[in-house]
Amino acid sequence: MSSKAFRTFNNGNKIPWIGFGTGTALYRQSAEHSISTALEAGFTHLDCAEMYGNEATVGPAIKKYLSGPEAHPRGSLFVTTKLNTIPSGKTVRDSIKVSLEKLQIDYVDLYLIHTPVPHQGRIKEVWKQMEDVYREGLAKNIGVSNFRLKDFAEFIDSAEIIPVVNQIEFNPYLLGATEPLLALHKKYNIMTASYGGLVPLSRKTGGPLDGIIPTIRERLSKDSGKQVTDGQVLLKWLNAYDAVSITTSSKRDRLVNLLETIALPDLTADEVKTIDEAGKKIHHRNYMQHMEL
């Protein structure tokens, strides 16, 4: 896969910049068929979570990919999962071991604290346990998700290992609200990962981007000689922010199209600026409204 398909963490490890998410439509549903379809389409980055309630159905698809008739090496697959709550008397290590058993692998490539809310007031302690599972090799990289400035303030100065990533809802309609957090990411060299990156095309249509994206799409189509989609334009905008993009679809052709974004020309600085300015005209958070930054 082209080097353009990867981002590099602050520890030098790499992550495919477009990942297949197993939440949203697959929440508490069997993900086995969808994961198999995504892998067949060329995805090598799977984004899972304990909270999604479907890790046990992701596992068989991963096992088939790694040990089936056309077996792939474990290093060819990047698997993320996330810590939910920690039951009384249990530890982060206990939680990741359960996830690994369900996923049928010996380690995850990335382990995230899914949300700070269940760990408020003890994030520092939980992060130290995250560092422990990293040192043990149960997770090759560790990070956070849905963390706000105040959540980082609880632990970042005492952290021995800086999170490699913060996965947040991020798209042009959240740019204005997210800029202070992006500044913190830059200060500590923490990568931004986006979910909900295509919300302006699916759940918040009729906004100021509607009149802008088609023009950029036409320019990309002309320059690339391929029929570019609106979704690819937004993925290229996220790419301009060096953000990992977590997306999903049940259709194989659509999944292939998403991955084809990697080879498309980048947006120009003026195009990024135009999307930025239009995005800041409204504010819309589609998921986890209580997590306003």
Image (spheres, grey):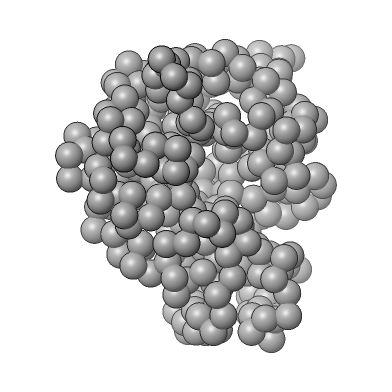
Query: Relative to 286, does residue 81 appear above or below in the rendering?
Result: above
Task: Looking at the picture, tell me which residue is in the foreground, 83 or 273.
Answer: 83
Q: In what quadrant of the picture does the C terminus appear?
A: bottom left
How many circles with numbers are drawn on the protein?
A: 0
Query: Relative to 139, does residue 69 appear above or below in the rendering?
Result: above
Q: Residue at x 33, y 30 (%)?
A: 126
Q: Position of residue 137 (x, y in %)?
A: 36, 18
Q: Position of residue 208 (x, y in %)?
A: 64, 84
Determine whether, in the image, residue 274 is placed left or right of residue 177. right
Q: Residue at x 68, y 54 (%)?
A: 258
**Quadrant in the picture for residue 76:** top right
Q: Residue at x 42, y 16 (%)?
A: 90
**Residue 96 in view of the camera:** no
Query: Relative to 249, does residue 108 appear above or below in the rendering?
Result: above
**Quadrant in the picture for residue 72:** top right
Q: Position of residue 97 (x, y in %)?
A: 48, 15
Q: Residue at x 48, y 39 (%)?
A: 114
Query: Relative to 273, does residue 196 appear above or below in the rendering?
Result: above
Q: Position of residue 2 (x, y in %)?
A: 52, 47
Task: Looking at the picture, tell me which residue is in the foreground, 235 or 119.
Answer: 119
**Residue 27 in view of the camera:** yes
